[in-house]
Image (spheres, rainbow, N blue to C red):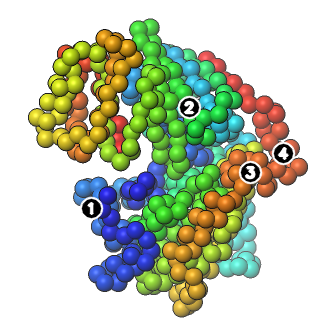
Amino acid sequence: MEVLFHNVRELVELANSENKLISEIMIEQEIMITGRSREEIIAQMDRNLTVMEEAVEKGLNGVRSTSGLTGGDAVLLQNYMKQGNTLSGELMLDAVSKAVATNEVNAAMGTICATPTAGSAGVVPGTLFAVKNKLNPTREQMIRYLFNAGAFGFVVANNASISGAAGGCQAEVGSAAGMAAAAIVEMAGGTPEQSAQAFAITLKNMLGLVCDPVAGLVEVPCVKRNAMGASNSLVAADMALAGVTSRIPCDEVIDAMYKIGQTMPTSLKETAQGGLAATPTGKWLEAKIFGGAVLNSGN
Amino acid sequence: MKFKSVFDIIGPVMIGPSSSHTAGAARIGRVARDLFGKQPTWAKIYLYGSFAETYKGHGTDVAIIGGLLDYDTFDERIKTAFEDAEKAGLSYEFIPETANTEHPNTARIVIGDGEQEMSMVGISIGGGKTEITELNGFPLRLSGNLAAILVVHEDRSGCIANVANCLAKYDINIGHMEVSRKEKGNMALMIIEVDQNVDENILEEITKLPNITQVTRIAD
């Protein structure tokens, strides 16, 4: 299959040589690969954006999962923000609360858009709808945010992994946070190179993160990992926009993530056998939810 | 490259909580219904590996039933699929298995109605992407790089030529093809991977050819 870019280096070089945004390169590659029209592709991303908006709104109104493990934290955060005494700042907590909102909706079997997976679906929209209030983007720029994030996710998915079962949480929330950081940079007017730097800085700080869901549910600690993924990406985006660079090139960080994932023990890769899932409380919650045995449903 | 489209990354739109255990499960159920060609009246679903361990919490069970009712990954009705199945006259049973399978997220779906029965094995490989590995005891080896059509037919001479001729008529190039049968003169299966998109009317034309039982398209 012919593609325009195989790694982040090629993506940035192409954007620079053609004087285009990274989001534009992603759109052009999608046209090339699928043979669909630009209008069709933009319209599909527009619909995905609407799904993200609706999920955030639903989560901010308060939801609860069937297991009772998660739900309501997005509301707590929004109420806290209204008191006006936040320490980490309004935009930061807005992003965190909207990331949490999305993942609470996901845990409650609501409708979400996987970015890149369902378990990590909060980071990209959470940051987008928070940064939106600061940068006042057009609808088109918001759609471009998703194409930029998609370009970096495309590289990770093909050169490393976006699966918790294959690479741990670093592959899911780590990738999502890097994607968000790169997209924030483009929306804020940064260069393609700065997007790559933001991705690298973010993922470097999520390397080694394991996937250890309590009771095997996409709830604990997934929802709060999305919160931290969102905050990580905002800080990294600011660092990259300030001119801070990663000593290790972006593609090498992605490769390191892949290799760490390969050597990570199976008990820490979405099997609910290690980490937080294996703590006394984790085990107790599992027994409480499933009664110690998996039930059959019939007719 | 396993991931080809930006919508493999920013997508799919789906009912939570897991792209592999919920969205992938719904897709496996829906392909089974597509291959069966109609709404089944009963279903036995055998779950293996991580599917067997965590299906309750992930809604893997309602998602598969939703798929059998032709619901897409984003269809809100997945949540009420059990009730909907009852109303639609579909009875079902989930059987968690302990046997080891090659892939951790594997489901064997056996469905039928008064007249026909079908068995299919599907795996969920991550991010909502799925693969079908077996149909009615025939191993399916789809590369996943091309669109494919599956043709169930009687094992009679001329069947393969007729189908190939029909595709040729519409300038559709065959990239890879496999033919298998259970025993001589019995049911057989063609798996045809094609370079171009196969329109619905071409599928209908193939269905009308002699000794063809069923034709299904699997998107890449």
* Mark in the foreground, 3 or 4: 3
User: Which image quadrant is residue A229 in?
Assistant: bottom right
* Mark in the foreground, 3 or 2: 3
Residue A169 picture location, percent across and down:
65, 60
Instruction: Please report, as a chain letter, where disc 3 is located.
Output: A
Q: Tell me whether circle 3 and circle 2 mark residues in contact (CB < 8 Å).
A: no
- Residue A71 in view: no
Secondary structure under tag 4 reads helix
Which residue lies under the disc numbered 2? B107
Q: Which residue is drawn at 56% across and 20% down?
A: B44
Q: Residue at x 14, y 30 (%)?
A: B165
Which residue lies under the disc numbered 3? A267
Q: For the residues tagged 1 and 4, is the chain the same?
A: yes
Residue B196 picture location, percent across and down:
22, 45
**How far, Cα to Cα, is label 3 from label 2?**
22 Å
Mark sitting on residue A283:
4
At label 4, the amino acid type is: Lys
At label 2, the amino acid type is: Ala
Which residue lies under the disc numbered 1? A32
The one of B174 and B150 positioned closer to us in this rendering: B174
At label 1, the amino acid type is: Met
Instruction: Please report, as a chain letter, where disc 2 is located.
Output: B
Secondary structure under tag 2 reads strand
Q: Tell me whether circle 2 and circle 1 mark residues in contact (CB < 8 Å).
A: no
Secondary structure under tag 3 reads helix
Q: Which residue is drawn at 59% across and 60% down?
A: A172
* Mark in the foreground, 3 or 1: 3
**How far, Cα to Cα, is label 1 from label 4?**
49 Å
**How far, Cα to Cα, is label 2 from label 1?**
35 Å
* Mark in the foreground, 4 or 2: 2
